[in-house]
Amino acid sequence: MSESLRLLKRIWAFVRREHLDDDLEDELAAHLQFAIDDNIARGMTPTEARRAALISIGGMDHARYKHREARGFMTLDIFKQDFKYTLRTLWHDPSFTVVAVLILALAIGANIAVFSVVNTLLLRPLPFPNAHELVWIAPPPTKCGMSCATYSTDAYDEFRTNSRSYQDVTGYFAFSGADNLSLNLGGAPLPATSIDVIQNFFQVLGVQAQMGRVFTPEDARNGAAPVVLLSNAWWKRQFNADPKIVGKAFDMNGKQTTVIGVLPASFDFGAVFAPGTKVDAITPLNLYGPPRNWGNIITLIGRTKPGITLGQAVDEAVRVAPTMCWNNRFPESCGNYKGAVVPVPLKDYIGGKLRRSLIVLWSAVGAILLIACVNLSNLLLARAAARAKEFAMRGALGASRGRIVRQLLTESLVLSSMGAIFGFMLAAVLVEWLAHQGAIALPLLSTLHMDGAALGWTVLISFFSATIFGIVPGLRMAGGNVYESLKDAGPGASASRKHERIRSVLVVSEVALACMLLVGAGLLLRSFVNVLKVDLGFEPDHAAAIKVDYDDNVPNDKDGSLSSQKRGVIFQQILTRIGSLPGVEAAGFTDYLPLGQNRSWGLPYPKGLKPPQGVDGPLVYVITPGYMRAMGTPIRGRDFAWSDAPKGEQVVMINKSFAQYLANLNAWSDRDALNKPLGNGGGPDLHIVGIVDDVHEENVDGDAGWQIYYPMTQAGPSAAELVVRTRMNPSMLAGPVLASLREMNPKQPANEFRPIRLLVNHAVSGRQFFMLLVVSFAGLGLLLAALGIYGVISYSVTRQTQEIGIRMALGATAGHVRGRILRSTLQLALVGIVIGVGASLAGAKLIAALLFGTSPWDAITYGSMALLLLMIAALSGYIPAFRASRINPTVALRTN
Amino acid sequence: MSPEKLDLLQGTLDLMVLQTLTVMGSMHGYGIARRIEQVSADEVLLNQGTIYASLVRLEQRGWISSHWGTSDNNRKAKFYAITATGKRQLAADARYWERLKDVMERVLTMDKSAEGADA
């Protein structure tokens, strides 16, 4: 009790020590006076009395010291002293201070920025209350895309009713594309993107409307009045953040739709569920209207009850899955979902794929920090060498070894703190910039921000780096022999040589680290180049796509053939018109573009054979004649024709992989799928009229799956994307194409005319992002290593000025001097490179999963990076070498 | 040559200060130091200055209190007085010292016969 009270008082005493010091001075003065008075009373002379009094006190300074020691914290006092002294010395050496702080700021800034990304994607919970309860419910990954990752309305209902583990289960419509909403405010319709969600979506996620309300079951009933929730960004951008927006109605897709609420800025549907896309509006999905018969359309998200473990939820899903039916009207479809209902934590679904990339990224910045620390160590050593006498003097005057180490560590701490402050600002700028890179397909990017954790991390790494880079020079200095340092008058002395050995070790480790970074960056870069070289199955350049509005509705159309006919007429007209625009080479429609959404409709199979269970069907695309030519995908056989009428022979095209699979079933004697009929689960046979190249439908770096193409005149498309191929820059066609579409259909919104190349860029943006980051870190590492080499070599040149002077006086040529210095530089670099290459070879496994078409032990990458590093080393050694060769022997010999 | 003065054991000075204040009442630092020197008949090695470390320690623990006042010869000085907690602490410390003294006495006066008696 009394001790904790005393602790508080001691801390308090540190704060008001000036007042207490004054108090003590008065007290000591009084004490001295009493003693003198007493002594004089005993008959001493005043001088004698004073002397005796001082002796009995035992030294005023000793008394003060003892008092302060008891009263407050000497550690704090000493730290304050050291701190003041450090600021003074750093102030007097601005070039050193600026370089050191800059190096640290870059390294620490990069670390904090990456930490923020890692924190957002891996460490921090998702931006929902009790986010750990949220699970993503989907089958294990398959090759039939979203159709196999989604569930039908009936299946959703069954799952929701039969599962006991969940507070509630929700989902959203997985197949809506960009620009699927057209907002009509008078004038040209404005394009926007909306998503249909099950009405309890926001309740399950725990998101409240910022204004107004979220959906209720009534909003999703048959015949309910159309309502919409606005994303915060769209509300600000399109509606000028109108504070009275709730309750207003607008013409959306031709229907008066009432705004019932505005979502908070913290909720960004795209950031969580559809990285790299923006979602402007959210509308309720009517499960019991037409979607009932659309098949697999809903992605499932559940919120487990408190206390339910993932294992329990998984077990239950295994029990419930067999009772789920694709469509309750077809009892044979019950049990289709067996083994295809697996809950995983929502967080793992969103960020799990990036774990490996983020770990690599984190290691890369860690290496940068180490390199920076080594560099700083080197700088401090050089400085310490210059200050050796100062420390020797302090040692001689009684400073203990610990006291000197403490002083040096305080300096390190001050430097790293300044670096951390600037680094934090740098990271804040970087993070802010990253958060606005909407085009990068990384989840949660827009929720990036600096927070308390980032601040904590900053403090942690600045302490860590201060210790790392301060300890070697500190021990070095404090361990030095006082007499030798005082004696050590000039170059060539043994202490300096020892110094140089340490510095060489530091440079070697720096080069080794930089080498590892470079190899990693090289491998990622080469992978990226390989990804760009992938044959996509289509030509992304010189083509662009725009979403087209059309109305193929025909009243009383029983089997859909009238509407197919009408659609054919509309599309043919549009294509004729667009095809006649100058510069257009080819044009065609598809409902889904590659590298975007996809779906499948089951598995068509050679007639006469029984389709197997558990084989995923091909991805389905509904297209018009001319689409393949517009995309640049070659066809073997024939393209669809406008004469492929709704009631005529049903035709399809399939891709090579699917054709290969079908041919290998041995149903056909010539083992060629072209011009063969396929059975289609009871429907009319499908005749394969063409076989096309494999198109990368989901990603660039994966394998292409199976694809099947239906003509728009025979199958219903879910949207219409007009693809136009031109010899010109596609953007030059944007105006004429939109104008033509408008002329034919005034309701055509001003949708974006997107170059197909953008789709590819978007698909590789995540890989590109990581590659660019690692490459820039490697560049930074290379720069720091070069600085390190330069520092060491130029220091040793300075130290050897006299020796070089003597050599030159004795006839050494400039070339000889240069060669000698370059040789020692390359020696250091080579040792570093050998160690670095060795470490890279050993650690390459870590990065292997991120590579594409590149071996983790790719000789070309290793070789070229080693060469690059060697060249940079030679360059940074050449500058001091050149300076050395210009030394004037007479001047050199005169100094010292 | 006078015999060497006694080094003060850790904590003994604090105890002496408390006892002095109990007996003498409110006193200033010099007075306490002189009093201890007189009582110990100059047998302990006391740098008078170290008394101030002891005083600040005791005050922070709440065992003594201080105030500025004037001495008999009209000088400004800081006066210390023992508090109620200080008195309790002194009693406890004094008991401890008594016991320690007894134990030390027995240890230092032990002889061989004690060993056999015990067994």
Image (cartoon, rainbow, N blue to C red):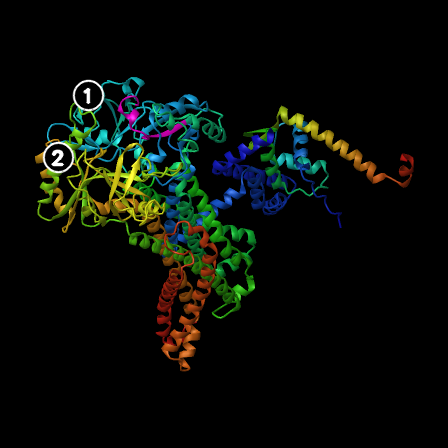
* B82 left or right of A605 in image: right
Q: Is residue A638 above or below residue A167?
A: below
For marks 2 and 1 on the same chain, the one whose residue lies earlier in the sequence: 1
Q: Position of residue A592 (x, y in %)?
A: 24, 38
Q: Residue furthest bottom?
A: A811
* A343 left or right of A758 in image: right
The N terminus of chain A, quarter of image: top right
- In front of the other: A169 or A459: A169
Q: Residues within 10 Å of mark 2 (few under 14, many from 20)?
A: some
Residue A332 is one of the magenta-drawn residues: no
The circle on residue A430 is: none
Which residue is pictured at 25% across the width and 47% down the height?
Answer: A692
Q: Position of residue A262 (x, y in %)?
A: 26, 25
Q: Which residue is mark 2?
A: A570
Q: Which residues are magenta?
A: A287-302
Q: Which residue is mark 1?
A: A248
